[in-house]
Amino acid sequence: METGVCSDVVVRAFRKAGIDLQKDVHDDMKANFSAYPTRWGLKGTDPNIDHRRVPNLQTYFTRKGKSLATDGGSETFLPGDIVTWDLGGGVDHVGMIVNVWYKPSQRYLIVHNIGAGTRMEDGLFAWKITGHYRYF
């Protein structure tokens, strides 16, 4: 899939697993708005964008999944895990660990979209990891 942003990759993966992350994030934000980041100055939820903001996903996965250590070795990052990164300059990024083992680095690849469409790459430690979540 060439269109969308990084969060769309995660939302689409969850849809394939039968989970409507767009609806679930929006519903949780609606019920618990004060638990979510306020950096956009919002007065309420927006079902069209709530799920596309990485800090909202971080909050949702902390609330509804399991937040794991971000400083572990690659062996602590398993297929299905969600990872968030700080790309610098206030830019957040999200991707998912996939079940493709990359022999040269001895770790699983990530799937993400960093502007060139959805890609599977050995990029787990390419940026500062800010979140590590397990939902499944």
Image (spheres, grey):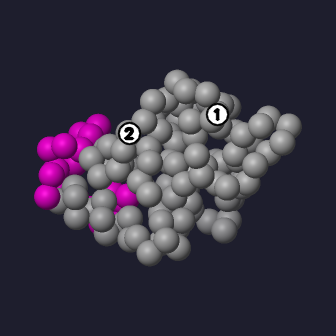
Q: Classify 10 Å Cα crowding around label 1: few (below 14), some (14-19), many (20 and above).
A: few
Query: Do we see residue 95 in this rendering?
Result: no
For residue 3, above or below residue 88: below
Q: Is residue 40 magenta?
A: yes
Question: Farthest residue in the front direction?
Answer: 75
Q: CA distance from mark 2 to mark 1?
A: 16 Å
Q: Picture coordinates of residue 133 (x, y %)?
A: 44, 44
Kindly identify which residue carries mark 1.
74
Front-lying residue, 2 or 62: 62
Asked which quadrant contains residue 58, the reply is top left
Which amino acid does the dot numbered 1 rest on?
Ser
Is residue 82 visible to the viewer in this orientation of the structure? Answer: yes
Mark nearer the N terminus (2 vs 1): 2
> Is residue 121 inside the magenta stretch?
no
Q: Residue at x 79, y 35 (%)?
A: 105
Image quadrant occupied by the N terminus: bottom right
Q: Main secondary structure of the magenta part?
A: loop
The boundaries of the magenta stretch are: 31-51
Residue at the image point whose x is 66% and y is 48% from the top = 110
Mark drawn on residue 42: none
The residue labelled by disc 2 is: 67
Asked if 5 appears above or below 129 in the picture, the reply is: below
Q: Residues within 10 Å of mark 2 (few under 14, many from 20)?
A: some
| Residue 113 pos. (x, y %) | 63, 53
